[in-house]
Amino acid sequence: MAITKAKNRVILVACPLEGHMTPMIQLGSMLHSKGFSITVAHTEFNSPNPQNHPDFTFLKLPENLAAGTDTSFFNLLPILFAINNNCKDALHNYLDRMMKNQENEGTVACVIYDTLMYFADSVAFELKIPSLIFRNTNAAYLRSLRVNLQLYNEKTDLLPASRLLDPVPGLDPLRFRDLPNPLDVPVPEIVMQFQVNLIETRSSLAYIWNTSDELEDSDLTDLKQHYQQVKFFSIGPFHKMVPPKSTTLLEEDKTCIDWLNKQAENSVVYISLGSLAMMDGKDLIEMAWGLANSKQPFLWVIRPGSIKGSKWIENLPEDFEEKIENRGRIVKWAPQREVLSHKAVGAFWSHCGWNSTLEGICEGLPIICRPIFADQKVNARYLSHVWKMGILLENFSENRETIEKCIRKVMVDEEGKEMRKNALNLKGKLDACVSHGGTSSKSLNDLSDFIHSLTT
Ligand code: UDX
């Protein structure tokens, strides 16, 4: 009887946040298609549903959060610190067991960990397993974060507000206000302590990027100078490299697709601020009136709990529904990739998280950019000033007139047509890089060869 040799195994250490878990699962699918067995190590908090991914093995790492821990956005950093402290032993024990049972389980080729799950590097190092870093954000963000942290180290004075619109030397077209951390107000020490972990490669051998050479050639080239000790694999956009499949941790309201089916082509503004961002109640009101007054149909995702001080949309103006005359639909969570590819959708109002940014670009949609934190400000500036397919809503509290004008600019005016043309052009480039022989496809083959080479 022929004995089949167990496949090489890759251990993915996932971060329990929507914008991190989705691309990590997609990375797992890509590597599985290249012949690797996949283990996804994840926390108990926000864990993925194993039934949705029958090809993978799942490993729960207890993070031991105290009962009643606040798991909202405001407590994110303490939670991430806790995970990095508390999940080490469970991962160590699992990997140790796997190493002793490689004949049946497959050789553990490497650990690939999310940037935020840096504890995995020390575990892999102890066990002499090669490790690679998965970056769910882009090259421009890492460049800007490096400069941002350097500026903190060099300066003790706060930047005067009048200089926020000045360009950051060496980071054209970013301005000081586009940097991940503000320089005009003090940043809590815990933020800086955490972020230092995000620019280091420790003992890891490579960076895996959800971006493409076409999109970020010069930023990637610049970073390669700083990180000469690691290899770079740019294999994005991930969601275009794998068959379409829902990977979300939240429940999608698919009824919005029926609603979209009834709308005219390119007429709908789709609005979503991702899985973490929060808004003030007054912003909600301005957004609502801006949308209503624009007279454009809209599909708006409002996550329960994402409006400060409300459970969901109970604080919308009483006459809002009457004013929009069936032109709008609000849902708690949408099948976003399906929505963006729907022919009725004509523009995307986004917080510019990197997944949303890529998903919008890949559908050739102009983007109304309303960044809120971290990489979002960098992404928004690139959408508006590098790729020229976005319009920037700069201030968090834009008023209804500005919002109405902005929507009309994108949906009706010449400026919007130009943005759509640029977006479609970029979409074409990304389609090419994920197709057979394209740069991302080739880079995925290189990554697969590299991981196999680690076991020989
Ligand atoms: C986080 C950070 O906030 C972001 O800045 C970083 O770039 C990635 O990690 P998040 O805010 O959730 O992510 O934004 P984003 O990266 O855009 O990811 C959101 C994901 O949720 C996307 O894949 C999107 O398709 C999905 N989504 C969003 C849905 O499936 N349904 C929705 O209704 C909204």
Image (tube, grey):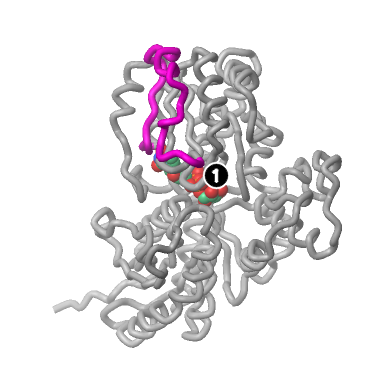
For label 1, count other residues whose C-alpha is less than 10 Å away and answer few (under 14), some (14-19) or many (20+): many
The image shows residue 48 at horizontal and vertical percentages of: 33, 57
Residue at screen point 74% across, 61% down? 149
Figure quadrant of the N terminus = bottom left
Say whether residue 205 is magenta. no
Residue at screen point 45% across, 26% down? 316
Distance from mark 1 CB to nearest ligand 1 atom below 8 Å: yes
Question: Could you tell me if residue 95 is visible in this image?
Answer: yes
Which amino acid type is marked by label 1? Answer: Gly
Query: Does residue 295 appear left or right of residue 47 in this picture?
Result: right
The image shows residue 282 at horizontal and vertical percentages of: 57, 31
Q: Which residues are magenta?
A: 308-335
Dividing the picture into quadrants, the one containing residue 67 is bottom left
For residue 279, above or below residue 442: above
The image shows residue 66 at horizontal and vertical percentages of: 41, 70
Residue at screen point 53% across, 75% down? 121
Front in this rendered view, residue 177 or 241 = 177
For residue 311, above or below residue 364: below
Q: Main secondary structure of the magenta part?
A: loop
Query: Does residue 27 appear left or right of residue 256 in this picture?
Result: right
Question: Could you tell me if residue 435 is visible in this image?
Answer: no
Say whether residue 334 is magenta. yes
Figure quadrant of the C terminus = bottom left
Q: SS of the residue at dot 1?
A: loop
For residue 299, above or below residue 214: above
For residue 315, above or below residue 40: above
Residue at screen point 65% across, 43% down? 377
**Which residue matches tag 1?**
353
Front in this rendered view, residue 433 or 310 = 310
Front in this rendered view, residue 181 or 437 = 181
The image shows residue 380 at horizontal and vertical percentages of: 64, 38
